Image (cartoon, helix red, strand yellow):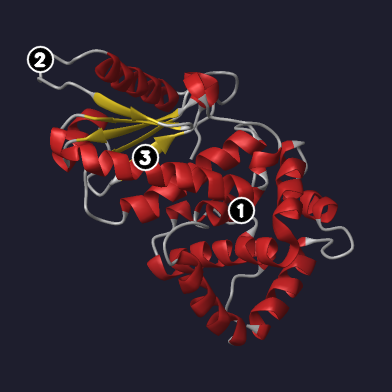
């Protein structure tokens, strides 16, 4: 999630992340002689991948190729690609690959369960970064598209705009492998049992501190299901208009009303249309 200054002052958390980002860039731009790390890189149109181990070269190439594919797909889905040619040349996103999890955790200070993260506060850093380590899990098919989606959405809408968490996380999950299939399967059952989260609750809920994993899973799967429904039923162009409404400062209900005039005029109406859609599947 983005980090913002509160009350006109920059928080300690923001300063810590600023120092971390600068430290990482210094490591990349200069050889770290104290640790023997020398960074190699691959560049494409929107991303630059940095890695340290020669055996990571093939993984870095695959990661770069997939990142470019995700960028094109995600930008098209949310209507981002219509308005400008972002993330090129010096604005390319930096993907930093540490050699292993131990080094990644030592250098970044992330919690032990972390497999990667992104920093999206372009107001502070004038850049974007995704940090991870060489791993054989689902990073490329899971976390990578998730974080790229967050970055694109926030670039499109604006880092200072307040949007519901379900919308942000729904967009972020669109290109995660098998996530939409899983969401369809579960949400059909929950709709049939009338056990889904009411949209008026979904729109105001912040699930990030939830300790009940079942509630958290339901929140995330319902979020991606609703976003997927809007794109499938009404198209990429209308979804882009929805994002533009949010960018212009509208709240989610006004933005929906403007983008889907004549079809959806409120959060309650969105729920009704989504329920009908799920019942037909």
Residue that extends furthest to the right in the rendered view of this protein = 262
Q: Is residue 37 left or right of residue 220?
A: left
From this viewpoint, is residue 214 visible?
yes
At x 48%, y 19%, the residue is: 90
Query: Seen in the image, is 268 located left or right of residue 162?
Result: right
Residue bearing the label numbered 3: 64
Q: Position of residue 126 (x, y in %)?
A: 50, 20
> For the residue carrying disc 3, how many other residues have a C-alpha within 10 Å: few (<14), some (14-19), or many (20+)?
many
> Is 266 situated left or right of 30 in this image?
right
- What kind of element bears circle 1? helix
At x 75%, y 63%, the residue is: 234
Which residue in the structure is indicated by mark 1?
Answer: 167
| Cα–Cα gap, marks 2 and 3 | 28 Å
Q: Residues within 10 Å of mark 1 (few under 14, many from 20)?
A: some
- Upstream in sequence: badge 2 or badge 3: 2
Q: Residue at x 41, y 23 (%)?
A: 12
Q: Is residue 30 above or below residue 1?
A: above
**Which class describes the residues within 10 Å of circle 2: few (<14), some (14-19), or many (20+)?**
few
Secondary structure, mark 3, is: helix
Q: Viewer-proximal residue, 164 or 280?
A: 280
**Rendered location of residue 87, percent (x, y):** 53, 29
- The front one of 138 and 246 is 138
Q: Which mark is residue 34?
A: 2
* Total number of numbered discs in the rendering: 3
Mark whose residue sits in front, 2 or 3: 3
Classify 18 as above or below 51: above
């Amino acid at each position: 999630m983005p980090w913002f200054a509160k009350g006109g002052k920059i928080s300690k958390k923001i300063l810590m992340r600023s120092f971390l980002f600068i430290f990482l860039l210094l490591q990349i731009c200069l050889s770290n002689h104290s640790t023997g790390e020398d960074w190699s890189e691959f560049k494409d149109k929107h991303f630059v991948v940095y890695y340290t181990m020669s055996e990571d070269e093939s993984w870095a190439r695959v990661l770069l190729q997939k990142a470019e594919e995700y960028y094109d797909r995600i930008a098209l889905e949310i209507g981002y690609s219509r308005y400008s040619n972002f993330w090129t040349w010096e604005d390319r996103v930096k993907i930093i690959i540490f050699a292993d999890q131990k080094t990644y955790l030592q250098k970044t200070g992330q919690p032990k369960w972390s497999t990667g993260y992104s920093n999206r506060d372009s107001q502070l850093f004038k850049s974007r970064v995704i940090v991870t380590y060489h791993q054989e899990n689902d990073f490329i098919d899971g976390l990578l598209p998730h974080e790229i989606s967050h970055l694109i959405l926030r670039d499109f809408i604006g880092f200072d705009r307040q949007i519901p968490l379900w919308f942000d996380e729904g967009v972020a999950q669109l290109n995660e492998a098998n996530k939409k299939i899983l969401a369809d399967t579960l949400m059909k059952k929950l709709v049939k049992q009338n056990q889904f989260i009411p949209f008026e609750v979904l729109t105001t809920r912040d699930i990030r501190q939830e300790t009940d994993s079942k509630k958290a899973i339901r929140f995330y799967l319902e979020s991606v299901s609703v976003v997927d429904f809007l794109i499938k039923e009404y198209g990429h162009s209308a979804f882009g208009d929805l994002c533009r409404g949010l960018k212009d400062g509208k709240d989610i209900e006004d933005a929906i009303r403007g983008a889907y005039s004549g079809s959806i005029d409120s959060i309650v109406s969105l729920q009704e249309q989504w329920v009908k859609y799920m019942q037909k599947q």
